Amino acid sequence: MRQWFNSGGDAGQAFPIYITVVGGLLFLALAYFAVGQAAATRSEAQTAADAAALAAALETRDQLADQWLANILEPDSWQEIFDGKAPVTSSCWRAHELAASNDASVTCQPDGLLGYTVVAETDETVGDTIVPGTEEQKASETAKAVIDARCSFELPVEEPDGDALPMLSCNGEDWNLDPDDPLNLPKPEDLFDVHLAD
C-alpha cells in the first residue's frame, strides 16, 4: 500500500488562509476600536450638553426664587413668577461656562419661559482611525432642560386680615410663610424642579 505525505504542501496552502483570517480579525478589531472612539466622543458631547443645559436652567431657577422672595408680601404676583414671567436675564452664560469645563463649546437658546436648549460640540476629535475623515470629526449632541414650578396656592376671596399670607403647597409639603423667619422659607429647590426633558 502506498501512502502519500504532502504535509509541506498542506501547510503552504493553509498559510495564506491564516494570513487572511488574521488580517480580517485585525481589521474588525480596528473597526470596533473606531466605533468605540466615536461612541466615547458622542458620550462626552452628550454629557457636556446635559450639564450645560442644566446649569443654565438652575441659574434661572435661582433668579425666579429670588424674585419670589422679593415679592413674598405680594401674593398676587406669585403665579407669574411660577410661570416664568418674572424679569430674569438669560442664563446661557452658565451653559458656556459648564461646557468649557467639559472640553466642549455650546450654542444655547432659551426654550420658552422655563427651559433651555443646548447643542454641545466636543473640542476633541474622534482621532485617527481606519475610517477616513475621523481625525477631524467632532461629536455634537443636544440637550434640553426645563424648570417646573412645584408649588400651588390659593388666594383668599376676600382681603386677608393683617399680613397673613396664603399657604404654599409644594409637592405635598405645606409652608406657613413667615417673612420674618427667612430660614424657614422655601429654598429654590423647594419652589422649582429642574430636569432634562425626554
Image (tube, rainbow, N blue to C red):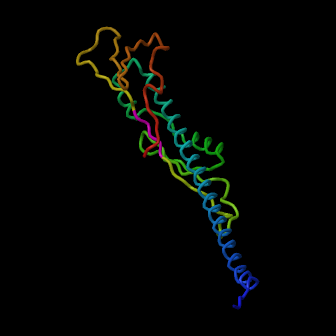
Furthest residue toward right: 8
Q: 80 or 61: which is nearer to us?
A: 61
Percent across and percent down for residue 189 are 47, 27
Residue drawn at point x = 62 percent, y = 41 percent:
97
Percent across and percent down for residue 62 are 50, 30
Q: 177 or 73: which is nearer to us?
A: 177
Furthest residue toward bottom: 2
Percent across and percent down for residue 104 are 63, 49
Q: Is residue 82 left or right of residue 15?
A: left
Percent across and percent down for residue 183 are 50, 14
Residue drawn at point x = 67 percent, y = 65 percent:
30
| Residue 14 lies within the magenta run | no
Residue drawn at point x = 58 percent, y = 39 percent:
94
Establish if 23 lies above or below 103.
Answer: below
Q: 141 or 62: which is nearer to us?
A: 141
Q: In the image, which residues are magenta? A: 144-148
Please give the count of numbered marks on the rendered protein: 0
Establish if 12 lies above or below 115.
Answer: below
* Magenta span: chief secondary structure: strand
